[in-house]
Image (cartoon, rainbow, N blue to C red):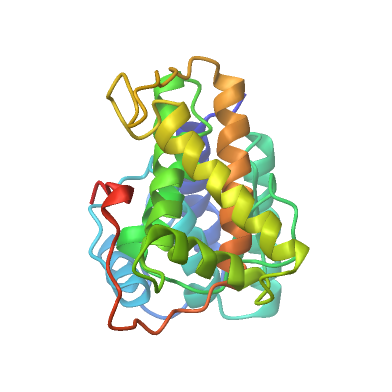
Amino acid sequence: MINIEKTCRSFNAWKNCELIKYKLKDDLVYERYYNEFECSKEWNEYQIKNEMLIYYGEIFAWDPTNLEQLKMLVELIYNSFLTTKDTRYEYTKSVNEIFARFNMPLRLKSGKLTETSYKTSNPIDKIISYSMFERKINYAEEMIFYKDIQDKKMALDCIVDALQYIVSIQNGKTIHLKKQEIAKLINMDENSKDYSVILEELNQILKMSNEYYDIRHNEYLNKSKEKRESLNDPLYIEYLYNRIYGFLYLIRLKYVVPIMDSNFEISEEFELPF
């Protein structure tokens, strides 16, 4: 059974009592002695927050049970705190054992956390817009693993928002031209099968999101006066989520920041919520 809070608590307990014994970057810990049955050192939480600010450029109200913050801390420790190959190897092994023990679909490799549910040898290595794009994906990755159907719906909603954002910032005055720019990320040849498949898939995903189901809209009827169906099957929600997630993962790997032309605008058809 996946249990995010237990995973977070387990890692933090291990960090405080085991990782503290590693050779770490200077001034990240300070000594505080307890009796022989307790840890002899403790993390300097102020310094950790400062390192997070330097590494990610954001001030965090630290929540030890927040999966997204845990993932960021795991990567930060590997890349900024550890000083030798041996300690990085031991750290990676221990972190992956914790994730495996709680059935979390995450794996640390070369300092990067990847979702084991998505099979690829290519990790995401770029940030497009953390506040408008990556943050939504990160939140969706966390929420999809909760059991409550409303949490799964929220994950689906966020992953759709992320996709629609990346489409909206493409060059082109109309939504059709913007979608064509997305297809060209995969293949510039408009006569190719790759281009046709991606464009058709994007059209289908956006139609499902805005017309078929109540993913992003609360209105009973869509613009064609057809009923939007409610999503009540958690397995089907996960299917839709993974279909869109896989599509978006490919786009992220291929993505190049566009140079905006004078006709650029966000189409009203997107009805963006941000």
Which of the 4 quarters of the picture holds residue 100? top right
Residue at the spot x=43%, y=60% of the render? 167
**In the depicted view, which residue is nearer to us: 62 or 42?**
62
- In this rendering, is residue 157 above or below 271? above
Residue at the spot x=38%, y=72% of the render? 28
- In this rendering, is residue 8 above or below 126? above
Relative placement, left or right, of 69 versus 78 is: left
- In this rendering, is residue 186 above or below 98? below
Screen quadrant of the N terminus: top right
Is residue 37 visible to the viewer in this orientation of the structure?
no
Where does residue 230 sit, x and y in percent of width and height? 43, 17
Where does residue 197 sit, x and y in percent of width and height? 70, 55
**In the depicted view, which residue is nearer to us: 86 or 232?**
232
- In this rendering, is residue 212 above or below 74? above
Which of the 4 quarters of the picture holds residue 155? top left
Where does residue 260 sit, x and y in percent of width and height? 34, 81
Residue at the spot x=57%, y=42% of the render? 204
Residue at the spot x=38%, y=50% of the render? 34
**In the depicted view, which residue is nearer to us: 187 or 161?**
187
